Image (cartoon, rainbow, N blue to C red):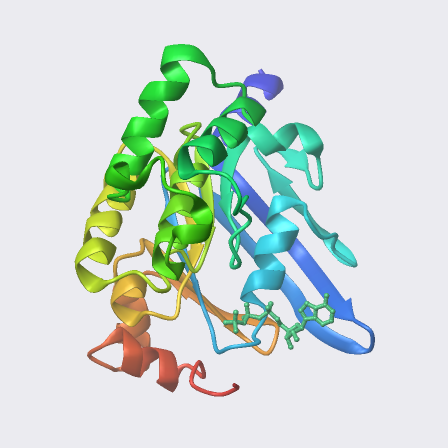
Amino acid sequence: MAMSVMANNEQETVLSIESVTRAFGSRMILNGISLDVKRGELLGLLGPSGSGKTTLIKLITGIDRTDRGEIRLFGERMPRLAMLSRFGYMAQSDALYNELSAKQNLQFFGKLYGLQGTRLTSRIQAAMGMVDLLDHLDKSVAAYSGGMKRRLSLAIALLHEPELLILDEPTVGIDPVLRLAIWQELLAMRDKGTTIILTTHVMDEADRCDRIGLLREGRLTAVDTPEALKRQSGKATIEEAFIALGGGAGQ
Ligand SMILES: Nc1ncnc2c1ncn2[C@@H]1O[C@H](COP(=O)(O)OP(=O)(O)OP(=O)(O)O)[C@@H](O)[C@H]1O
């Protein structure tokens, strides 16, 4: 009985962050962060440059370790290698093989995730269609523009249809029309149950998230829906709310 209740709870909470602290040298970068993310939720992390968004993302993926506190993905304490296949990760700087074609990159990463044969081929088509790069599959990545590399990195993160997507500034350098199309895809994935955690500096993107976590000087100063944050700050737009709630400081 107790076991089944626990299993249900664990299924609901995809990510649990508890009292997490991370310092570099004597500088406290993250200070007592606690946050839960439920299955099928789209959480946006917003904060001034240097507020610790990427540091937090790296702790969630297990690339970096907390100094204090704990992070659990799907109930498992991170870092844990076995969790790698459960999420798709898009880093802030693209990790691509420049000398290979886009297709070869996708095949390489796809095989790492256990995809092969017709499933790998169909997933490559679907993911590249989503980022509008199907016409450039055979092009060498060295010949890709910065925005195209971002889109290819996103396609790789989506390739194995993970139940959790962790995206660090996924739409930087992507033009507004395609950005909108990518957001429609992300929202459709969310609606089908994919959990998405992303960082952004773009206010209209933040507005589309289910909840926004506001980071400032290493602390999570607010976590709520865009509507609640606007109400709480008495502001009409998320941009004004962000500044009113202390997000405008820094740089
Ligand atoms: N490995 C490291 N060693 C020392 N300092 C680091 C390290 N990684 C990050 N920092 C520092 O931690 C702070 C937070 O960096 P982080 O990249 O998490 O910020 P961010 O909110 O993602 O910023 P941006 O929006 O500009 O990407 C910065 O001052 C950065 O210089």
Residue 206, by quadrant, is bottom left
Is any atom of residue 10 visible in this view? no
Compare residues 171 and 67 and report the one nearer the observer: 171
Task: Name the quadrant of the N terminus.
Answer: top right
Q: Residue at x 44, y 27 (%)?
A: 160
Q: Residue furthest top?
A: 117
Compare residues 128 and 217 and report the one nearer the observer: 128
Q: Height in image: 82 above or below 215?
A: above
Image check: 250 left or right of 180? right
Q: Residue furthest left?
A: 177
Compare residues 109 and 86 and report the one nearer the observer: 109
Residue 192, by quadrant, is top left
Q: Residue at x 54, y 25 (%)?
A: 113
x then y, percent, for residue 102: 41, 38
Is any atom of residue 119 visible in this view? yes
Q: Residue at x 48, y 88 (%)?
A: 249
Q: Height in image: 223 above or below 126?
A: below
Split into quadrants, the picture shows ligand 1 in the one at: bottom right
x then y, percent, for residue 14: 50, 38
x then y, percent, for residue 251: 52, 85
Q: Height in image: 78 above or below 82?
A: below
Image check: 28 left or right of 247? right
